Amino acid sequence: MSIYGIDWQTLSMLYFVTVLSCVCISDFKRRLIPHAITYPSIIVGILYSTLYRHDGIGALAGVGISYIVFDFSAFYGQILYTKFAVPISDREEETKSNGNSDEQEVIGGGDAVLAALIASFLGWERLIYALIVSTIVGGIMAAVYRLRDLQRSQKIEQCCKPSVIGFAVAFAAVLLCYAIFVGLFSAGKMLELLPAWLMLAGAVGVIGSLAGIVLGTSSESKSSKSIPLAFALSCGGVIAMFHNPLGLILHGGN
């Protein structure tokens, strides 16, 4: 169907982006991803993928991957958060006052449903790319939230050391990879690619710096608010609409 240049794909993608926008607003305002929106939209997405994209199996596989990945992350993320991010004194205090320590939700069930929604429209290949992008965006958001907490508690200077260490480790890791490739391939050709590798090292270094801030100052943050991951996932979903690197690698992608 094509009416005035608008076809089913355009309408479906407009619906997809509209749903993501509504979910983001709800998550920012209420820290809630409403199932009343996401579950019906997953059905719409599976129908769209089956009838228009002719990839219903890929959409269902993506939905399954979403639940497996996020349930795994939620379970082990809780263990890591409790063990490393919560100071021992705070854990002992909570145990004495409540009988057991309160659980901090790292990734909610709504995030898994939102990832499944993205998979239902875009398939499992683009879902993986969307998750990679959302991890980067989520890391930036976590660092910004942490910096805000430190600034409010007048401890902003404590982020300097972990930030520098994180940048140095990430930057050095990329340069080490470059050195390995120089040994494997022609040194002349790799020298021509040095500017691109330095740009990559800088970008990865920034990500490492943000990770250093989050991990290195976790004991200083007293914020109980969760990060609205719907925005990060939605950014990944929108970008994955236009790019499919995994598809290009596997079979030429579209």
Image (cartoon, rainbow, N blue to C red):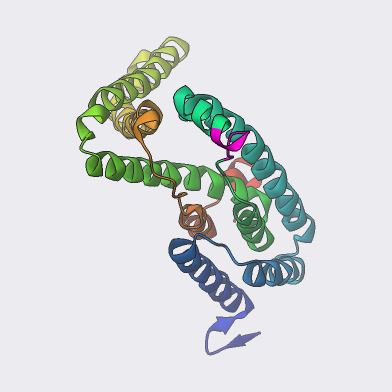
As drawn, 46 above or below 235: below
Q: Position of residue 12 (x, y in %)?
A: 61, 74
As drawn, 100 above or below 42: above
What residue is shown at x 48% (from left), y 56% (from top)? Answer: 239
Marks counted in the figure total 0
- In the image, 68 versus 95, the foreground residue is 95
From this viewpoint, is residue 34 visible? yes
- In the image, 140 versus 221, the foreground residue is 221
User: How would you classify the magenta stretch by its main secondary structure?
Assistant: loop
Please identify the quadrant where the N terminus is shown.
bottom right
Q: Is residue 102 magenta?
A: yes
What residue is shown at x 35% (from left), y 46% (from top)? Answer: 145
Q: Position of residue 136 (x, y in %)?
A: 44, 42
Please identify the quadrant where the C terminus is shown.
bottom right
Residue 104 lies in what quarter of the image? top right
From this viewpoint, is residue 87 visible? no
Residue span colored magenta: 97-103
Task: Classify residue 108 as left or right of residue 186.
Answer: right
Task: Classify residue 100 as left or right of residue 215.
Answer: right
Q: Position of residue 175 (x, y in %)?
A: 35, 18
Q: Is residue 152 magenta?
A: no
